[in-house]
Image (tube, rainbow, N blue to C red):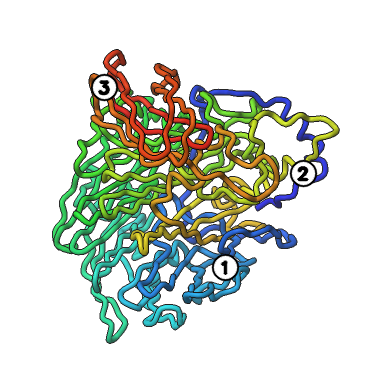
Amino acid sequence: MKKILLAISALFLVNAMFAQTQRVDARTQKVSAPFHKTEITGREQFAEPENVNPMTRNMSRNFIGTTYYDLQTNGSMTSRIVRHDDGTISAIWTTCGNGAATRGTGYNYYDGNSWKNASMNTDRIENVRTGWGTLACVGNAEIVVSHNGSNALVIAICPEKGTENWQFTTLQGPSVSGPNGATSTCLLWPAIATSGNTVHLIACTESDEGYLYQGIQTCLVYYRGTFNSSTNTIAWEQPRIVGNVTAAEVSKFSGDSYAIAAKGNNVAIATAPGMTRDAFIWKSTDNGVNFTKTVFFETPHAGDTAYRCDGSIAVAIGDDGLVHVAAGTYLCYIESDEATTYTWYPGVGYLLYWNENMSPITYDGTQSSADPDVVEQSGHGVIQRFNLDCDTSLWQLTDWGVDAYAEYGVGVVSFPQLVAQNGKVYMTFCQLMEYPFIDLDNSMYFRGVFATKSTDNGQSFGDISWLSYNRDCYYLSSWELFPMDEETTLNDILQYIQAEGENVFPAVYPNIVDGNIYMLWQTDPQAGTAIKDHELTYSADESYTYFFQMTADSIGIYNNVHEVCQGLWPDNYSGVGITSNDLMNMKMYPNPATETVKITFSAENAQNGVISVMNLMGQTVYTSNLQVNEGSNYVILPVNEFNAGVYMVTLRTNTGLSTQKLIVK
């Protein structure tokens, strides 16, 4: 990666660049460009790195690993972290040292007091080149599955967690026929989940052109295995094609465009095979013996400009057995099913949430079938790209084109992860941020890690927390452009860049333990990835893996994004962080409504407040002042004159803000 400190010449260009900054609605900017989603298998051409000095940063989180390989997935994040019952934690990531052949699975272990391995350690657990490791546990045994990119999956088993006494076997896939009589047993991009002593594994067959399994290119197959704790081995059953699909239904899967979860006897696999193919779940209620397929997103045909799944998907199973899914989307035009060039809107996209109690999103032949407002009005969850300065447009640099949107092969709100437990749903995701959170060195916008939660089992989601917000950041409460004069130091601008950086690839442990959510993600100073187009196999600078833990129910309160435009963020380099939200427990009923809505909430202090209602076009349709009392409060909102649709209701005081979705019939 390029170094975070800008070259001297670049510093003198900052004034000119910022002078061209203005508010632009990115949702209207259409770009025609080739957009190739490169799936890295392990057979890339090796490149030698530049000789650079290690980058130093002020680390304010648990910094558990380093890698020169800055691509952790082609689409969906697999299981990378396990929180054990005794309070210890296992974590992995794809690592690489200063030579391309050193790629493998990085590993760290928290023994209850500290992380075991040194932060700068890029050692791998395997003794051969691998990638795309995924982690799960059976009892005290750790299981890591990765691919070697040539002929098999590498199965690593450590009988006693934390000891790093890894034992290795391989799993070859079914023989796949290729051109000129060639065959392959290669399996790629694995994902695993465990339940009891059963290991559930999915992976793709050979991805090279012309290698078809049952007529399907890069076919996604499912293996069920039984772990034997006496021999520390796994007995695998014969593979099955996920969804029992045929070549007539799905001609090709894409690497990492799927996710798997297991809880009790329930197993769920969610997949979005491609931009012109339907997204579906494959569910078993008997621990993987039998499965039922359900399409939850009918993809629009080629020839339409429409929202399509971007291949980044997450799945979780609740205590009640209900399957929950989140998937990124983007807006694009595709000429044909196999097109590699298409017209797309890089500033557009939303995160779709669906569960089995919801109807599928159907394609009715119109381009608007999957538009976010249509999907939301049908009762599905929609998280759109939001503005951190809370206006109706996004800060953009007008001379930055499509290249400003770092290529990950996903939409602007994507890389979701889910936890479903005790009637609540916790969702983390990445969002493309706006000015001033930009990579000036590469003229790109950074992404950050965010989270939201539902307290009604997915019916609605509340406020959003900015998880990757670095407490060392420097913020201005006014959110105006920097006054570029002799009194303004360039150091102020660099604080935005150095302290936040790019934060991507969140991986979340799928259970809430002791009321906490446990996760990790990758952070680095450069937006985007150097691992693309098979030109590089690792970066010239380090990326870092962070461990993050927080109280699950504080999601929506901790680092609440609405507090940015309330002026509650620090306006000096104090490191204090965001003021706690004073408003709590906001509820609205009935919802949906036709006449009136009762809104209840709590406040820590008596103060003046404002209630406002905004439609999905960003227009305020109602506002009223109110007196907020200490403790419990309620207000009656008349909606009988509102048009049918979806609205955002916001309560605001000087020290707090809370927003919820309202549906008016």
Q: Is residue 292 above or below residue 595?
A: below
Residue 267 x %, y %? 22, 58
Mark linked to residue 101: 1
Q: Earlier in the sequence, mark 1 or mark 2?
A: 1
Answer yes or no: is residue 299 visible: yes
Spatial CA distance of label 1 from label 2 is: 38 Å
Mark 1 packing: few (<14 Cα in 10 Å), some, or many (20+)?
A: some
**In the displayed structure, does residue 30 sit left or right of residue 193?**
right
Label 2 sits on residue: 491
- Badge 1 marks a residue whose secondary structure is helix
- Badge 3 marks a residue whose secondary structure is strand
Residue 189 x %, y %? 39, 59
Front position among marks 1 and 2: 2
**CB within 8 Å, label 1 to label 2:** no
Label 3 sits on residue: 596
Q: Residue furthest bottom?
A: 230
**In the displayed structure, does residue 655 sit left or right of residue 77?**
right
Closer-to-camera residue (489/285):
489
Residue at left 23%, top 63%? 239
Kindly indicate the quadrant of the structure image that contains residue 228: bottom left
Q: Amino acid at mark 1?
A: Ala
Residue 226 x %, y %? 23, 74
- Badge 2 marks a residue whose secondary structure is helix
Answer yes or no: is residue 151 visible: no
Residue at left 44%, top 61%? 132
Kindly indicate the quadrant of the structure image that contains residue 463: top left
Q: Earlier in the sequence, mark 3 or mark 1?
A: 1
Mark 3 packing: few (<14 Cα in 10 Å), some, or many (20+)?
A: some
Q: Amino acid at mark 2?
A: Asn
**In the displayed structure, does residue 278 sit left or right of residue 524?**
left
